[in-house]
Image: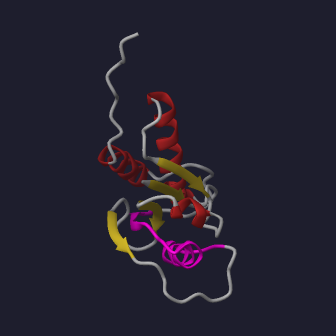
Amino acid sequence: MLIIGYGNPLRGDDAVGLLAAERLLDWIERQGDIPGIEVIARPCLTIELAANLAGHRRALFIDAALAGPAGAIRRRRLQPATERGPLPHVLSPTELLGWCQWLYGVAPRSSLITIAGASFNYAEGRLSPLVESALARLLKRLGLKQRPPQPA
């Protein structure tokens, strides 16, 4: 499985996806690699990520949402976009999946998890309390639990 968290680290709650991926990466580094899981943290989705997607059967995107009550967590299935226009600098998850399908002939089964933001004002790397709490709930749902110590 590939997990891609993305968002603008300068715009308050817009950073939630990026911070989710960074916290997952930190946790994996402390606990040891988890076979079959790759995590990527990015400020935006770009075409280069299509190669990463092509190597996985499943993908999970994590991002902030403008709509909804602050801190609300939603998950929805994604389908690759079927139409491609000129290649923009930044892609949506469905556009990225569409490019992956077109370039590599495959696209992983994918979902998007969003956390509705409360504030998108300038706040470098700081989330609002409601979104910080939602992020903690999401990470717990994704299985961030301490592994028991391994015998030496």
Direction from residue 71 to residue 51 in the image, left or right: right
**Residue 74 spot, x, y in % from top left:** 33, 65
User: Which residues are the magenta region?
Assistant: 90-117
Check the image and report above or below for 40 versus 76.
above
| Side (left or right) of 90 relative to 63 | right
- x 47%, y 55%: residue: 2
- 89 relative to 144 in the view: left or right: right
Image coordinates for residue 113, horizontal then vertical, percent: 39, 63
- Classify 13 as above or below 144: below
Q: Which quarter of the picture shows residue 112?
A: bottom left
The answer to whether one can see residue 68 in this image is no
Residue 71, position in %: x, y? 36, 59
Residue furthest to the front: 105
Image point 47% across, 49% down: which residue? 20
Q: Nearer the viewer, residue 54 or 39?
A: 54
Q: Quadrant of residue 15?
A: bottom right
Question: Which quadrant holds the N terminus?
Answer: bottom left
Q: Quadrant of residue 90?
A: bottom right
Q: Position of residue 44 (x, y in %)?
A: 61, 64
At 50% across and 73% down in the image, what residue appears?
97
